[in-house]
Amino acid sequence: MSTETITEKAPLTLTEGAIKELKKLKDQQEISDDFGLRIGVEGGGCSGMSYILGFDQKKEGDSEYSIAGIRVFMNKAHGLYLAGMEVDFRNGLDARGFTFNNPNASSTCGCGSSFSA
């Protein structure tokens, strides 16, 4: 398994709100430092593809980035779908949770957790 760390610029961004919430979740759940934030896509959802967002260990075929001190893992094949995407965290009356602003999505579902490209 490759332990190579990629230091190039991450193909996606995390807003300040997302960074704050992710750091809070990592502390609350006492997640160890060998875990990072996995961002990716998988088949499924009402629009064809769903987003993956969660803490995980690095796997073969992953690129690793550092965004505001958060280790981010992404399968290299998912870069095509996630390039330029912004992950935000909303905590308002209309919505609460992580949101995905993906310029590569040709359409999204009403809940915003799946898309087609």
Image (spheres, rainbow, N blue to C red):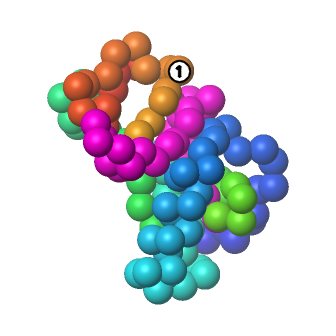
Residue 33 lies in what quarter of the image? bottom right
Front one among 4 and 73: 73
Residue 36's place in the image compared with 105, above or below, is below
Coordinates of residue 76 in the picture (x, y in percent): 59, 45
- Please provide the residue range marked out in magenta: 71-97
Residue 65 lies in what quarter of the image? bottom right
Front one among 104 and 79: 104
Whether 37 is among the magenta residues is no
- Residue at the top extreme? 106
Residue visible at 32% across and 22% down in the picture: 108
Work out which quarter of the rendered image holds the C terminus and state it: top left
Question: Alpha-carbon neighbours of circle 1 within 10 Å: few (<14), some, or many (≥20)?
Answer: some
Front one among 89 and 59: 89
Give the structural element (helix, strand or loop) at label 1: loop
Q: Is any part of residue 57 visible from this angle?
A: no
Residue visible at 43% across and 81% down in the picture: 28
Left or right: where 81 falls relative to 52: right
Q: Please state which amino acid type lies under the numbered disc 1.
A: Pro
Residue 3 lies in what quarter of the image? bottom right
Work out which quarter of the rendered image holds the N terminus and state it: bottom right
Residue 108's place in the image compared with 61, above or below, is above
Q: Which residue is mark 1?
A: 103
Residue 57's place in the image compared with 113, above or below, is below
Residue visible at 45% across and 71% down in the picture: 25
Coordinates of residue 98 in the picture (x, y in percent): 40, 47
Left or right: where 70 falls relative to 50: right
- Residue at the front extreme? 93
Coordinates of residue 54 in the picture (x, y in percent): 42, 61
Residue visible at 81% across and 48% down in the picture: 8
